[in-house]
Image: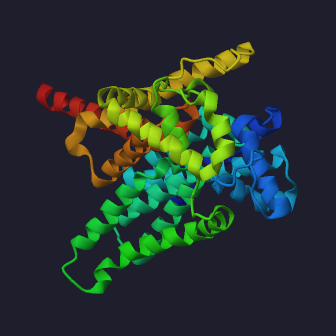
C-alpha cells in the first residue's frame, strides 16, 4: 500500500468516526431548544416563512443572524426541525475535523501528527455534544478553522485570491458572532505585513489588502442593507452594547449576569419599549463605558478574571445537576480531556525558540479570540471555537516532548558509549 493510500485511509477513518459519533449523538439525545437556541430556530423559520427575520421579541437584529441564515436553505429543502439542525451540525463537525487535519499539515511535522490532532478533536466531548444544540458555535468552529488554515498558507505563499477569501470568511464570522472581531487584527498584520515586504511601490502592492476588505464587504453588505431598510441604520447586531453593559456594571462578574440583576434591571424593559432597539442599546453602551472609566482598576481586574474564567476547567455540573451516572462519567472524561489539551498546548511555550511563524499564528488566533470576552462576560460554550486550534497546539506540544525525550536518550547513549 502506498504512502498516499495509507494517508487517505487514516484520514477517512477519522472522518467516518467523527461522523458516526456525531450522528449517534443526534439520534440518541433529545434536547429541546431553549433560550438562545430556541431563538435561533425562530429566526431561521421566520426568515423562511416571511422573508423577514424575527426573534419573537420584537428585535430586528439583536442576535447575530449568520447561523440562522445558514440554516434557512436546509430548512427549505428538508423541513424546519431540530433533527435537520442536528444533521447539519454533524456535517459541520466532520468538516471541522478535516480542517483541523489541514491546519495540522501546516503547523505539525508530518501528516501522522496532523491526523493525531484531527482525532483529538473528533472525539472531544463538547464538540460531539453540541451537535445536538442549535448553537452558533457549530458554524463558528469551521469558519475560524478555515480562516486559520488560509492564514497559515498565506504566511508562506501570499496571494490576492487568498486575501480575498480571508476577508470573505472574516465577514461571515462577524455575521455568525462578533467574538472573532479581534482576529481581524491578525489578518491585517499578516496581509499588510507581507505587502510591506514587497519592494515595489505600485498599486499592486496593496492589492491583497484591498482584496481582503472587498471580501469582507461582500459578506456583510446584504445584511447591512437589510438592517438599514428595517432600522434606518446598518448594523450587524445590537447585542454588543447589551453584552458590554452586562459585563461592566456594579453587579457584573466574570460569568453571565442577566439584565434583571443589573442596576438597569428595574427600568430596562420600559426603556426598551420607549426608546426602541437602537437608542436603548446606545444608552446601555454609554452606561457601560461610564462605569469602566469611573472604575478603571476594578474593570481591569475583572477583565483579567474573565480571561482566567474563559480557561477554567469544567468542574461544574449541569444547570440542574448531573441527571445520571452516565452524565457524571462524561463530565469526568471531559475534565480529564480538557486538562490534557490545555497542558500540552501550553508545553510549546517552554520551547519558545522552536516556535515557527505558523505556531505564533495559532497562539495569536486563540489569544485574540479569548481577549474579546474580557469586555463582556464568559459562558463555557464560548470557548468551543478555540479548542480545535488548541488541539493542534496540544499535538505540537506532545511532539516537542517526544523529540526532546529522543534527543535526551541519544545524548545519553553517546556519552555511555
Left or right, 394 with respect to 5, comes to left
Left or right, 261 with respect to 319, comes to left
Q: Which residue is at a point 55% across and 31% down the rendered structure image?
A: 379
The location of residue 21, given as percent across then percent down, is 71, 38
Question: In front here: 224 or 308?
Answer: 224
Q: Which residue is at a point 52% across and 41% down the rendered structure image?
A: 284
Using the rendered view, name the quadrant where residue 105 is placed: bottom left
Q: Which residue is at a point 45% across and 43% down the rendered structure image?
A: 286
> Does 317 sit above or below residue 126?
above
**How is this picture coloured?**
rainbow
The location of residue 49, given as percent across then percent down, is 86, 60
> Does 297 sit above or below residue 324?
below
Q: Which residue is at a point 46% across and 44% down the rendered structure image?
A: 389
Using the rendered view, name the quadrant where residue 346 is placed: top left
Quadrant of the image containing the C terminus: top left
> Does 8 sit above or below residue 32?
below
Amino acid at each position: 500500500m502506498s504512502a498516499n493510500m495509507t494517508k487517505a485511509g487514516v484520514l477517512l477513518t477519522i472522518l467516518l468516526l467523527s461522523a458516526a459519533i456525531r450522528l449517534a449523538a443526534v439520534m440518541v439525545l433529545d434536547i429541546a431548544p431553549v433560550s438562545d437556541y430556541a431563538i435561533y430556530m425562530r429566526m431561521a423559520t421566520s426568515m423562511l416563512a416571511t422573508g423577514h427575520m424575527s426573534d419573537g421579541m420584537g428585535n430586528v437584529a439583536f442576535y447575530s443572524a449568520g447561523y440562522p441564515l445558514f440554516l434557512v436553505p436546509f430548512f427549505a429543502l428538508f423541513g424546519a426541525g431540530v433533527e435537520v439542525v442536528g444533521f447539519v451540525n454533524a456535517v459541520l463537525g466532520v468538516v471541522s475535523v478535516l480542517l483541523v487535519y489541514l491546519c495540522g499539515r501546516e503547523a505539525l511535522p508530518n501528516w501522522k501528527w496532523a491526523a493525531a490532532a484531527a482525532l483529538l478533536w473528533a472525539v472531544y466531548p463538547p464538540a460531539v455534544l453540541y451537535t445536538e444544540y442549535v448553537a452558533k458555535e457549530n458554524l463558528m468552529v469551521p469558519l475560524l478553522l478555515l480562516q486559520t488554515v488560509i492564514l497559515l498558507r498565506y504566511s508562506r505563499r501570499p496571494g490576492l485570491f487568498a486575501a480575498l477569501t480571508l476577508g470573505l470568511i472574516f465577514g461571515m464570522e462577524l455575521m455568525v458572532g462578533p467574538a472573532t472581531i479581534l482576529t481581524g487584527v491578525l489578518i491585517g498584520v499578516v496581509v499588510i505585513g507581507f505587502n510591506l515586504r514587497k519592494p515595489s511601490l505600485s498599486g499592486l502592492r496593496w492589492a491583497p489588502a484591498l482584496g481582503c476588505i472587498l471580501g469582507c464587504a461582500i459578506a456583510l453588505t446584504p445584511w447591512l442593507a437589510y438592517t438599514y431598510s428595517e432600522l434606518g441604520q446598518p448594523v450587524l447586531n445590537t447585542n454588543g452594547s447589551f453584552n458590554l453593559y452586562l459585563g461592566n456594571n456594579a453587579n457584573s462578574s466574570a460569568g453571565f449576569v442577566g439584565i434583571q440583576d443589573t442596576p438597569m434591571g428595574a427600568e430596562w424593559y420600559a426603556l426598551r419599549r420607549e426608546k426602541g432597539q437602537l437608542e436603548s442599546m446606545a444608552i446601555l453602551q454609554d452606561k457601560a463605558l461610564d462605569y469602566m472609566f469611573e472604575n478603571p482598576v476594578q474593570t481591569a481586574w475583572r477583565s483579567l478574571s474573565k480571561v482566567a474564567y474563559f480557561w477554567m476547567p469544567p468542574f461544574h455540573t449541569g444547570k440542574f445537576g448531573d441527571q445520571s451516572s452516565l452524565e457524571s462519567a462524561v463530565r469526568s472524561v471531559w475534565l480529564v480531556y480538557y486538562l490534557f489539551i490545555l497542558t500540552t498546548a501550553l508545553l510549546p511555550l517552554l520551547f519558545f525558540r522552536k516556535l515557527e511563524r505558523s505556531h505564533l499564528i495559532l497562539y495569536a488566533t486563540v489569544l485574540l479570540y479569548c481577549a474579546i470576552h474580557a469586555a463582556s462576560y464568559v459562558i463555557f460554550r464560548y470557548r468551543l471555537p478555540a479548542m480545535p486550534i488548541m488541539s493542534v497546539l496540544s499535538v505540537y506540544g506532545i511532539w516537542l516532548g517526544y523529540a526532546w525525550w529522543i534527543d535526551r536518550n541519544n545524548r545519553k547513549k553517546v556519552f555511555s558509549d
